[in-house]
Amino acid sequence: MANQFVVQLKNEPGAMAVLAESLAARGVDLRAIGGGGIGGAGHVIMTTADDDATRHVLDEGAYVYVEGESILAEVDDRPGGMARLSRALADAGVNIYGHLFLGRWGDRAMFAFVVDRPDVARPILERKG
C-alpha cells in the first residue's frame, strides 16, 4: 500500500477544495481519504496513487503534514476492536498519527495506520488480526 499522509488544514470553507484541486492539477489520484475538523483546526488523512507527486504538492503549498508507511490491520468487527488495538499501541508507546477505515468483510474490519514507530507497531497490528 502507498504511504499515508496526515495533512493539517484550516477548518474553513474551501480548505479541502484547494488541496484536492492542487492534487488533481498534478494528476494525483486519491485512493483513500478521511478527515475532520474542530474549531479552527482540520486535517485530512489520505493515500494516493503517487507519493512523490503528493509530497511535491504538499511541500509547494507549504502544508504541515506527516508522511508514513501505511500499516494494515485486520480486527474483529465488533465493539471493542479499535479499543483493544489502540490500547496495545499506546501500551507499547506508539503514537497514532492517523488511520483510515478501509472496509468490512464478513466479521472483519480493515484499517490502515500511520504511526511514529512503525517497527514497534507492525508486530502489534499484525497479531491483532
Image (cartoon, rainbow, N blue to C red):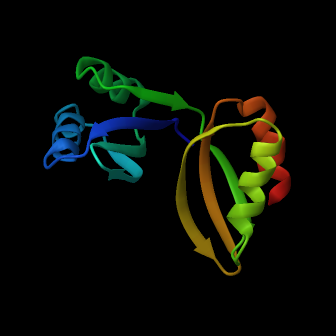
Q: Nearer the viewer, residue 29 or 42?
A: 42
Residue under the image location 75 percent in, 56 percent down: 85
Q: Nearer the viewer, residue 125 or 9?
A: 9
Residue 88 vs 103, above or below: the answer is: above
Residue under the image location 66 percent in, 50 percent down: 72
User: Horizontal and vertical percent for residue 49?
Assistant: 40, 40
Residue 88 vs 61, above or below: the answer is: below
Q: How many marks?
A: 0
Residue 109 vs 64, above or below: the answer is: below
Residue under the image location 76 percent in, 45 percent down: 89
User: Horizontal and vertical percent for residue 96?
Assistant: 62, 41
For this view, does 13 lie left or right of residue 108?
A: left
Q: Nearer the viewer, residue 93 or 74?
A: 93
Which quarter of the rendering shows the C terminus? bottom right
Residue projecting furthest to the bottom: 106
Residue 101 vs 13, above or below: the answer is: below
For this view, does 9 lie left or right of residue 123?
A: left
Residue under the image location 41 percent in, 50 percent down: 31
Q: Nearer the viewer, residue 82 or 128?
A: 82
User: Horizontal and vertical percent for residue 113?
Assistant: 61, 46
Residue projecting furthest to the front: 39
For this view, does 79 lie left or right of residue 17?
A: right
Which quarter of the rendering shows the N terminus? top right
